[in-house]
Image (spheres, helix red, strand yellow):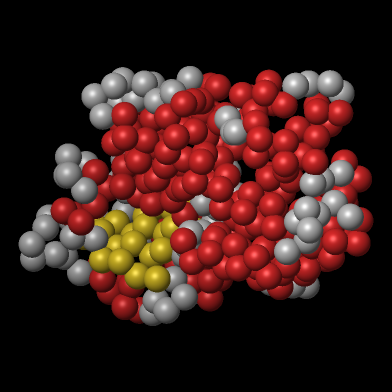
């Protein structure tokens, strides 16, 4: 439970969606939405300290309480720390200043002042198995739908761990099932899985066939149809490779192609073709290369686009040289 709205507040967390959700709850106070409070919004990278504090100190003519929100406030705080510490120690009693930031160490003086005289809301991103619990609670609390842990795990496999994207998909699924009270794994496969798998496997299929041009064209199509693709690209490709690697290993151990197809919710003929165009060694090398690409992107050594295109070119050529293609 978030504390009541105070004259000075901080909403702290790495995920912007969770911060926005916390802000909405904090501002609700009997209103239908945050806009009903007439909150003045500023972006931290362009916000002027004097303007922000004047806004916070000036009583509103239309509302009995002034609310000022500074989003992405990390840089704003760093540039104005001393002044914000002074304000936080004696904030205006006619309004609330809310700082939304990715981090605010507990050891800082500003944190201690806000914690003592105001309120700090922490938005911790669920990790590991906890994300499935978040999915089930979100579906029930926000959309009134049940979703069991198997379905939640499947959705996580399809979308990833980003709460905002998971919420958007849960909203679409809730609309899709209509009056039905439960979202099932089958619903997820029909509405979510097929589209994502088709996009990713269009890339990996072309790679395994040694068709560099088609693989790059398929990748560009992913970018054109999914605005989050640059951020999810390497993780999405790694997910597809992991699925193929597990299927190839199971197939070699004697699991029937029909059983694998049922497990992976796909067509047996298509799956058999995919498996036979890959090798365990090749897929393991793809995993290693994707890990290296992800590290390069995160450390500034490459961009997502460059990393993905290098990956496609390398492994398309490998497929041609190893004789795994159908050509």
Percent coordinates x, y for residue 325 in the rendering: 81, 54
Foreground of the two, 314 or 83 = 314
Figure quadrant of residue 136? top left
**Placement of the C terminus among the 4 image quadrants:** bottom right
Q: Vertically, is 145 above or below 2?
A: above
**Placement of the N terminus among the 4 image quadrants:** top left
Foreground of the two, 125 or 230 = 230
Toward the front, the furthest residue is 327
Q: Residue at x 73, y 67 (%)?
A: 212
| Number of numbered discs on residues | 0
Figure quadrant of residue 179? top left
Percent coordinates x, y for residue 194 in the rendering: 51, 41
In the image, 80: left or right of 93?
A: right
In the image, 241: left or right of 252?
A: left
Percent coordinates x, y for residue 152 in the rendering: 52, 28
Residue 112 appears in the figure: no
Q: Residue at x 53, y 21 (%)?
A: 149
Foreground of the two, 280 or 180 = 280
Residue 319 appears in the figure: yes
Foreground of the two, 93 or 130 = 130
Q: Vertically, is 102 above or below 43?
A: above
Q: Residue at x 44, y 71 (%)?
A: 44
Percent coordinates x, y for residue 276 in the rendering: 80, 41
Q: Residue at x 60, y 68 (%)?
A: 217
């Amino acid at each position: 439970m978030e504390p009541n709205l105070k004259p000075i507040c901080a909403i702290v967390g790495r995920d912007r969606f969770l911060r926005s959700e916390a802000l909405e709850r904090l501002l609700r106070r009997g209103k239908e939405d945050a806009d009903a409070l007439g909150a003045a919004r500023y972006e931290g990278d362009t916000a002027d300290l004097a303007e922000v504090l004047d806004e916070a100190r000036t009583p509103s003519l239309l509302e009995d309480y002034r609310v000022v929100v500074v989003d992405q406030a990390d840089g704003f705080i760093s540039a104005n720390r001393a002044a914000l510490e002074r304000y936080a120690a004696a904030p205006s009693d006619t309004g609330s200043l809310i700082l939304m930031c990715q981090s605010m160490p507990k050891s800082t003086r500003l944190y201690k002042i806000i914690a003592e005289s105001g309120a700090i809301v922490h938005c911790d991103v669920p990790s590991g198995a906890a994300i499935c619990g978040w999915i089930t609670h979100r579906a029930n609390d926000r959309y009134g739908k049940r979703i069991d842990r198997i379905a939640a795990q499947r959705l996580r496999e399809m979308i990833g761990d980003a709460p905002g994207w998971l919420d958007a998909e849960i909203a679409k699924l809730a609309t899709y099932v209509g009056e039905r009270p439960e979202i099932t794994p089958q619903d997820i496969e029909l509405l979510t899985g097929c589209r994502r798998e088709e996009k990713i496997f269009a890339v990996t299929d072309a790679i395994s066939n040694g068709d560099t041009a088609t693989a790059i064209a398929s990748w560009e199509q992913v970018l054109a149809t999914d605005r989050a693709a640059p951020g999810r690209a390497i993780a999405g490709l790694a997910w597809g490779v992991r699925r193929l690697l597990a299927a190839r290993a199971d197939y070699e151990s004697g699991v029937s192609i029909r059983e694998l197809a049922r497990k992976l919710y796909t067509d047996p003929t298509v799956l058999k073709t995919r498996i036979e165009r890959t090798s365990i060694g090749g897929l393991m090398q793809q995993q290693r290369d994707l890990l290296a690409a992800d590290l390069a992107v995160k450390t500034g050594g490459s961009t997502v686009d460059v990393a993905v295109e290098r990956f496609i070119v390398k492994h398309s050529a490998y497929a041609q040289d190893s004789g795994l293609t159908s050509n």
